[in-house]
Image: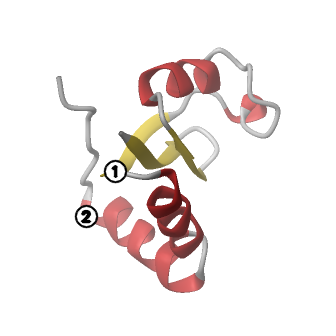
Amino acid sequence: MYYTYVLYSPKFDKIYIGQTDNFENRLERHNLGMVRSTKAYLPWDILHFEVFKTRGEAMRREKELKTHIGRDFIRDILLNGRVRQLPD
């Protein structure tokens, strides 16, 4: 399984969009300050994620979310207060 995810730093009002095949590990690395591009904005919350069968699909969705329309979709999630959790 591959994941496209959106993290949110409420302290800094920052959004980070990425993709991975190990979501729990990747989120932990973000929140431990082990990812250079996100370590200055700790802590990170899961704002949104989607599951895909292939890395290519996850990468395409990551690219879509980084467009103006994708960022509007993300801001809509923020405004409506919908924060998703990783399923068990």
The reply to whether discs 2 and 1 touch (Cβ–Cβ < 8 Å) is: no
Residue at the image position 49 percent from the left and 85 percent from the top = 69
In which image quadrant can residue 87 be found? top left
Front-lying residue, 54 or 48: 54
Q: Position of residue 53 (x, y in %)?
A: 34, 50
| 43 or 67: nearer the viewer | 67
Extreme-left residue of the structure: 88
Mark number, residue 35: none
Residue at the spot of label 2: 80
Q: Quadrant of the C terminus?
A: top left
Q: Residue at x 26, y 55 (%)?
A: 81
Q: Secondary structure at mark 1?
A: loop
| Residue topped by disc 1 | 53
Which residue is located at x 59 percent, y 70 percent? 63
Q: Residues within 10 Å of mark 2 (few under 14, many from 20)?
A: few
Mark closer to the observer (2, 1): 1
Which residue type carries mark 2? Asn
Q: Locate residue 15, reporting x and y percent.
A: 58, 53
**Which residue is outermost to the bottom?**
69
- What secondary structure is found at the residue carrying circle 2? helix
With respect to residue 12, does 57 lie above or below? below
Considering depth in this image, is 53 or 35 the residue closer to the camera?
53
Assign the N terminus to one quadrant of the image.
Answer: top left
Report the residue at 54% width, 62% height from top: 62
Q: Looking at numbered disc 1 in the image, what kind of residue is underneath it?
A: Lys
Q: Quadrant of residue 57?
A: bottom left
Furthest toward the right, the residue is 36
Q: CA distance from mark 2 to mark 1?
A: 28 Å
